[in-house]
Every structure is written in C-alpha cells, then in structure tokens.
Image (spheres, grey):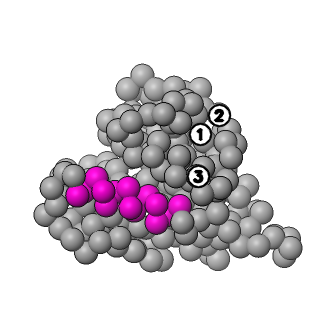
C-alpha cells in the first residue's frame, strides 16, 4: 500500500433476509463477491477498519467478507456494533443468520461494541436503538457500503438501510451503493454506484 493514504474506516448497511433472498447462502454469492471486490479496492487505498451492524442478512455477510479479507491482510480490524444486548432473541437457534451462526461469527471480531446494555425492549425502543447503532457506525466511519436495490432510499420509509444512507449523506460520508435486483430467491443485476 502507498503510505500516503490515510487509514480509513468503512461501515456496512443493508437489508434483512426477508427483503433479500431468504436463508440460503448460495443465493448471496453475487453480493459476497461484489462486496469483497469493493472492500479489496478500499483496502488498497487505506481502509483498515470495517464495521458491521450484527443484524441478519447483509450485516453478517459483510462481516464475513471483511473477516475473509483480514485473513490475507491481518492489519485489518473487523468490528461489530450491536444495538442492544438481546438483539438476537428472535433469531432461529441454528442455520444461516441464526443465534449460533451470529455467535460463532462475532467471536472472530476484533471488537464488539454495544450501543445499549438494555434488553427486553419493546418494538419502538428496539427501533430507536437500531437507528442509533446505524448512526454510531456512520459517525465512526469515512465510507459507507450500502446494499440497496434502487434510488428510493432518498424517500423510503420503514427502512433502516434507507435511514442509514440518508444519515450518511447528511454527514457528508462517501457512500458506495451496491444496487441489485431480487426475486426472493436469487440476487442479480449487481452494480456499484458511488452516491456521495
């Protein structure tokens, strides 16, 4: 790496499995490959820390991707921001994106940060803390990689990913959007667009 690049932090945001291709890992391979390609490029221009949000879906895939890149470049720091202590209480016990999957994955993290030590939250408070987690990740990052299908993130309601992207734009962060099409079983037509 050229030593003139400043070390940068990248965070990830994206949807849950029910808005993507469900719980079959093979369906996500195009997303994983594209995310890896982008992370490699960012690493070579100074990205040394990667932050994921610990949620099912893209967050976990992004964490795995950064961890795989770290196996080649051990100077990478792979961090997870968890919104609250029992965030995974509704995850299945086993399988893709399950409690067991998450625990095994995040045991590999260089650092796990909890936005709140609260648990047994009602839906409204959980949503507030999920958004606070997203804001904390953006605040601690220079670059955001967002998996979102189209340009509707600018006005979409009821989307943590869209909220996170708007917050990143407001904060002047560089955003790379991974656009895609999805029929509920597979993800296609992937392209990377620099948004901000």
Q: In this view, does 187 lie to the left or right of 35?
A: left
Asked if the residue under mark 2 is in contact with the one under mark 1, i.e. CB atoms within 8 Å, the reply is yes
Q: Can residue 131 be found in the magenta stretch?
A: yes
Which of the two discs, 1 and 2, labels the residue nearer the N terminus?
1
Label 2: how many Cα within 10 Å (few below 14, some 14–19, many 20+): few
Q: Residue at x 53, y 46 (%)?
A: 166
Which residue is at the front of the view, 140 or 38? 140
Q: Residue at x 43, y 53 (%)?
A: 59
Which of the two discs, 3 and 2, labels the residue nearer the N terminus?
3
Which residue is at the front of the view, 36 or 122? 122
Give the residue number, with chain letter if any, for mark 2: 191
Marks 1 and 3: which is nearer the front?
A: 3
Image quadrant where one finds the N terminus: bottom right
Tell me the element at label 3.
helix
Q: Can residue 25 be found in the magenta stretch?
A: no
Tag on residue 178?
1
Residue 88 higher or lower than 196, as above or below: below
Q: Is residue 114 left or right of residue 154?
A: left
Tag on residue 170?
3
């Amino acid at each position: 790496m050229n030593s003139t690049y400043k070390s940068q932090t990248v965070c990830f945001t994206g949807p849950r499995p029910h808005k993507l291709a469900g719980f079959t890992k093979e369906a996500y391979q195009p997303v994983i490959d594209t995310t890896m390609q982008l992370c490699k490029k960012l690493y070579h221009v100074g990205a040394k820390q990667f932050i994921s949000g610990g949620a099912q879906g893209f967050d976990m895939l992004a964490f795995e991707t950064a961890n795989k890149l770290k196996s080649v470049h051990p100077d990478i720091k792979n961090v997870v921001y968890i919104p609250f202590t029992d965030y995974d209480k509704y995850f299945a016990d086993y399988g893709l994106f399950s409690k067991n999957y998450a625990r095994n994955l995040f045991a590999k993290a260089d650092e796990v940060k909890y936005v709140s030590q609260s648990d047994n939250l009602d839906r409204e408070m959980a949503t507030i803390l999920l958004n606070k987690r997203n804001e904390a990740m953006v605040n601690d990052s220079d670059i955001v990689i967002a998996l979102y299908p189209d340009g509707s993130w600018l006005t979409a309601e009821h989307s943590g990913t869209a909220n996170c992207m708007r917050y990143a734009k407001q904060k002047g962060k560089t955003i790379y959007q991974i656009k895609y099409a999805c029929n509920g079983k597979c993800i296609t037509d992937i392209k990377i667009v620099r948004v901000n």
